[in-house]
Image: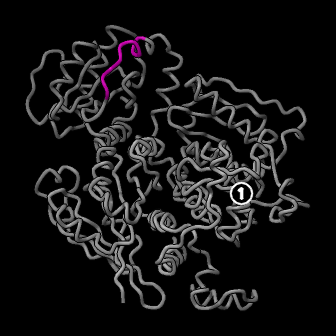
Amino acid sequence: MSQYKIIFTGPVGAGKTTAIGSISDIPPIKTDASASDMTKSRKAETTVAMDYGILNLAGGEKIHLYGTPGQERFDFMWDILVTGGIGLILLLDNTRADPFQDMKFFLEAFNKFIVKTSVAIGVTQMDISTKPTIADYHLQLETLGIKPPVFAVDARVKNDVSMLVQSLLFSLDPGLEGNHESLCAEFGALYLSNTRRSLLRGLCYGY
Amino acid sequence: MDERTHKLMAMYLQGTYKGAAVVVDDLNAEIDIFDADSVKAKTLLERRLAESARPIIALSLHELTLENILYVKKPVKTAGLLFALNEAGAILSATKKPDNPLNVHAENTASRPSQDFSAKTESLLSTEKNQVEKQAINTDEQRKTSKHQTAMQFDEGKFNAYIGSVPGLDVNDPKQFPNATYDPKDYFQEYVQSALMAAETQKQAIHMNSGWKPLIILPHNHEIWLDADDKQLRAFASVSMNKISGAKITFTPVDSGLASMQDSLEKFHDKDAFLWKLAVWTSKGRYPSDLDIHRAVFLKHWPNFTRLVVTPQALRISALLMAGPRTLPDIAEVLKIKPQYVFVFISAAYALGLVEQAKREMDEVIQPSTIKKSEKQGLLSRITGKLRVNKS
């Protein structure tokens, strides 16, 4: 069976570990360690290798969620991590000194991967620092010639992370069907009576 | 100080020190607080001393003996900072009548642009405007729950009940498309949009008097404060203003009374999120009459979906429009969705200025009739299905 993965990247403290934990079907496997360098000023522990989570799909397929280490000295791992990836989630911390610089850095670092796939950007900590605004990010991205989804995200909130990942997938193919009927179509259950649809909905989704 | 420290300082002063001082922006500050241990502290302190006569409090791990600077040793203790604030207040009172509480500017040494002298002079002259800004900025962002809550995401089943419908009109019937329009000018939406424009142009907080609930626009923070809940707003959104006898809406600059808003922080809304849902409720599945249904529209950029009401198929519609301009019926046809979902999304995005009608004929000629399917479409569909089912 093929291995599919979605990559989460961004600077130290942007919420990659938390975001993976928000949507993963397993408790995320974390490789945090005490920070000993400049990272220490932003968080007590940081990811030194990578984070890992799983989305289990119907039929036994698994989507692997990988979080890159935020520190630049681990960038040699980034190329390895993205191989075979479906797309990139870039998380940016709005309280950092220059989030635009962070954005440009990561977009440049993952440029080849983004060109082949797609990227969606989540801006975290906007309840602490409201500026730059999401509109400011779009203006910056315009100068770079790309128009990816940019959402305010609370990495602890599953709905926020879920919507960001969905936007990435729809960017790859707007024709995807993510509604209930199409999900049940996976089980061969299109165009059914309301009663039968209700039954199958219960079977498919547990409600 | 970085932004996080800046915010923490604001919260800190609202706790133990409540009433002693508040954090405001640079233009309105009476006292500066510096983190003297930051990299650029020395340069900024020197510049501040040269440019301003404001009292300065420096926080440092090290003993400081600097002329004209009040020193507080880190870790900061209540008594030490209160003493320094009192000292600073005494210095201020010697030069002018002090406001209460004191307005403090916590210096951000990381990214703040240099002070513009003319702007500073202007601020000293326009005291009324400053008063509005001071009070608008003195808020606890994190307690504005409406602004930062995650999006409400609708599927097809619940959506019709949420937005309602127009009696006698089937917006999904192509023959009725020409009638499936609404003019925002007839509704509350237009008045809110006009007030927003006025507030932003004048850079002035505005009170909109509509004879309904008090609504205040705070352009500096991109916020709207409304003394009504969503249920009330939804009902009022669909009422034709022409039918309200004697409806006369006026805008007045707000120069006092903003402090009372701080007691109801849940009534603050992000400007875009507010306008988006107002347009959804006004539309009721119709599209704005300004748009020609036979001409393509384009989307300037993705809406900030995590903080908006997510209408059915909105993510797909956005992704499709980001790939190129299309007419509204074409969007529905390509995505195989009800036109109603396209119309309501376009109404909301148009209200925010995110949608425009393609002006060039070329845009319509080049629009592809189909979309390129991803090789992994089945897999990607299963992931989106999974994410939607699992939403919390």
Whether residue B268 appears in this view of the structure is no
Q: Is residue B239 left or right of residue B96?
A: right
Residue in the picture at 63% in, 49% down: B363
Q: Is residue B19 left or right of residue A159?
A: left
Residue in the picture at 87% in, 62% down: B175
Quarter in which the N terminus of chain B is drawn: top left
Q: Is residue B314 above or below residue B281?
A: below
Q: Nearer the viewer, residue B156 or B148?
A: B156
Task: Report x, y in % for residue B259.
Answer: 54, 31
Q: Chain ID for label 1?
A: B
Give the residues drawn in magenta, as a range.
B113-121
Task: Report x, y in % for residue B85.
Answer: 28, 25
Q: Is residue B120 magenta?
A: yes
Q: Which quadrant holds residue A18?
A: bottom left
Residue at label 1?
B328
Q: Residues within 10 Å of mark 1 (few under 14, many from 20)?
A: many
Task: Report x, y in % for residue B301.
Answer: 53, 49
Helix, strand or loop at mark 1: helix
Q: Which quadrant holds residue B5?
A: top left
Residue type beneath disc 1: Leu
Task: Report x, y in % for residue A8.
Answer: 33, 65
Q: Is residue B72 magenta?
A: no
